[in-house]
Image (tube, rainbow, N blue to C red):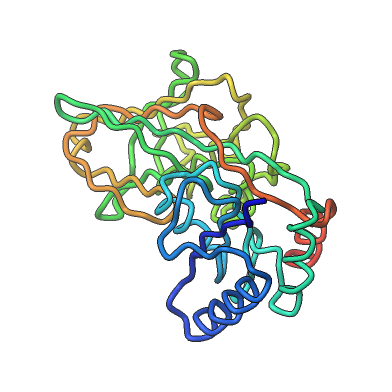
Amino acid sequence: MTPHAFNIYSNNNQRSLAIRAVLIDKLQYRALQVNQDPRPDADLNICIGGDGSFLRAVHSSGFSQVPFVGINTGHLGFYQEILVSEIDSFIDQFIHGEYINTELGLLSGRIAHGDSSQELFALNEFVVRTQNSTIAHMEVYVDDYHLENFAGDGLIVSTPSGSTAYNFSVGGSVLYQTMKGFQMVPIAPINSRAYRSLLNPLVMPNTTKLRLVPTPREGDNILVIADGINLDFKEIEYIEFTFGKKHINRIVFNPMWYWINIKDKFL
């Protein structure tokens, strides 16, 4: 029987690197394979650090279909279920198949700019705002229906699994991580005689196509941020969002982990 093989991702924090070394020793002691470089045929992607490390691993892996799990050496740890003190029991549980596989949907953002377009993906959210922190003006279309002319600091388009991140901090709704849908949340919207913008989150089913169209004068001033990664495009004509075309797999050992996190981090 071929031994389990593991890809290990870690931030460069001194504690994370020390835990990485301990983890490798424990895996190799059990005659399990640790890949020197991430491989697409591995059994598990292990991410050491905080939620930021988890997101970077997901992106750097090219949104690998190899399941992910996180060992928490950070602070918030919404994706990082395993505590350092639980590494031995985690390895044993994984070997014996004592876990649940969950699918976390990815948000697609197609950016039309100049004479071309580019499709990007985010696990948490896309943020759309101006580069120089001036008021962002955008037309908002839902399934090609004109909904509003937005004015404000920007808009967050968030996945359910990202709803407890930036989305939450600006008043967005908390959506259970495996729900089939996404939401748009305004950042400091302007609602006056001159501008009429939605003040609350807009939750949409996963079949929805959301399109943001910046005013022509702002096409070169729009900044798109995917999971904290700044994306610089010129002559942006529109950004179109859809949900659920792709997903990642994440394994969970405690079926109540999500609710434990909500209570522990927010209440």
In the image: residue 113, left or right of residue 63:
left
Q: Could you tell me which quadrant the C terminus lies in?
A: bottom right
In the image: residue 178, left or right of residue 64:
right
Q: Where residue 121 sits: x, y (%)?
A: 43, 39
Q: Residue at x 72, y 66 (%)?
A: 91
40 vs 184, nearest the viewer: 40
61 vs 231, nearest the viewer: 61
Q: Residue furthest front?
A: 1
Q: Where residue 154 sits: x, y (%)?
A: 41, 45
144 vs 139, nearest the viewer: 144
84 vs 200, nearest the viewer: 84
Q: Is residue 198 above or below residue 260?
A: above
Choose top left, top right, bottom left or bottom right for residue 221. Answer: top left
Q: Is residue 36 above or below residue 118?
A: below
Q: Residue at x 20, y 29 (%)?
A: 216
In the image: residue 144, left or right of residue 77:
left
Q: Residue at x 58, y 80 (%)?
A: 19
Q: Where residue 165 sits: x, y (%)?
A: 58, 56
Q: Is residue 109 above or below residue 254?
A: above
Q: Is residue 224 above or below residue 95?
A: above
Q: Residue at x 82, y 56 (%)?
A: 254
Q: Where residue 105 sits: x, y (%)?
A: 58, 36
